[in-house]
Amino acid sequence: MSDPDFYSRVAATLLNIETEGLLKPERVLESAQGGMVRIGGRDIINLCANNYLGLANDPRVVEAAIEATHRWGAGLASVRFICGTQSIHKELEASIAAYLGLEDAILFAAAFDANGGVFEPLLGNQDAIVSDSLNHASIIDGVRLSKAQRYRYRTNDMEDLEAQLKAAREAGARTILIATDGVFSMDGTIADLQMIAALAERYGAITLVDDCHASGFIGPKGRGTLHACGVEAQIDIVTGTFGKALGGAMGGFVAGRGEVIALLRQRARPYLFSNALTPAVCGASLAAIEIAESAEGDDRRARIAANARQFRTAMSAAGFELLPGEHPIIPVMIHDAGRAQQMAAALLEAGILATGFSYPVVPHGAARIRTQMSAALSAEQVTRAADIFAEVGRQLEIIP
């Protein structure tokens, strides 16, 4: 041990995180992902998965992953431009691009990598990125890797967005890119894409939308916020994931015009220096997209919406403070970080898996239990979950 002070500082930081009630425990699941999961030998109602369509353990998705593994192997042991592209990769890229109504797409090992790799190849120091202040950490990190000038606007504040666009244009930016989440993951708020598209047109900007919390279940046929807001022809670039509604495995993508995707294949560092997405993930994702586009997908989206309405109604009636919205992300506001972690632990003991979020994931004083509805939950399970929330909330004196 050459530097004992280093390890002392690490230990002290961890102790400080725990003392402040900011420690993020990891629950070990003894089952597949689903509406119910097994933890510690007990079946628990799961309210914290991004498994919106309930496809993570769907037999067809699982079988597609197995079949792809049998046919293509466990992996490519290489990056794609060397010897790591198989026809299943091209099939998935074509499938997700067609599903979203865009020309082409490129796969990444993770959605974080997609956002981390998209900005630097496309924009230089003569350009500007105008980014929503609540954008996902992957967008923030991706913007930092770019040499473009950086501007931030208050979340979903279109007056501030216009002010930043004016500033970028007056500073002589060659190209201006507006970057926003389609759905803000901590709040469940949908970006004002109609106004963003109008402002982009007014100031000659291009637009990028991260639709990770929308692809598969928001808008017609689940094609995302662009289609839900009617601006699919006006948005230039979409980033997203196969790790949420579209199979629940992992992997991300960037979709857009052909020349943009072609340049990313040549210059995006996470693409050039990461192994190709596994055939199993490709197979599972292809099966999930097919289901999402089908009439069954419509039924699953209707179930998500019904579950969200039911849960919101019951929780509001019980006296909980909820952030308003229609998205299946339903934040239950606790405000105090320690209390949020205490409630999450009590909920788990009572039979619900739901995660407490606090700073730095959300602002100081905005700690919450973020619940998420899915098509994997029955109406009876939603009722039971709201009842357990109410019991625990009264025990902890969070509600009267």
Image: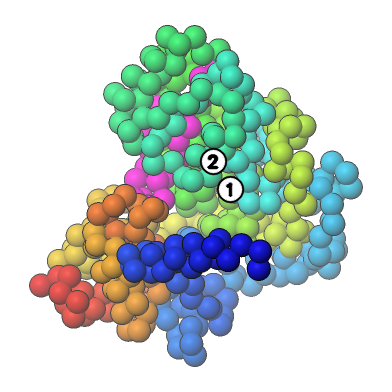
x and y percentages locating residue 218 in the rendered image: 44, 48
Image-quadrant location for residue 104 = top right
Answer whether residue 181 is magenta in the image: yes
Total marks shown come to 2
Point out the residue furthest to the right here: 83
Q: Residue at x 31, y 79 (%)?
A: 346
Res. 264 in view: yes
- Reading the image, the residue beneath label 2 is 141
Q: Decide: marks 1, 2 in contact (CB < 8 A)? A: yes
Which image quadrant: the C terminus? Answer: bottom left
Q: Amino acid at mark 2?
A: Asp
Q: Residue at x 51, y 22 (%)?
A: 149
Q: Is residue 215 above or below residue 283?
A: above
Q: Is residue 265 left or right of residue 52?
A: right
Which element type, helix, strand or loop, lies under badge 1?
A: helix
Q: Is residue 314 left or right of residue 75?
A: left
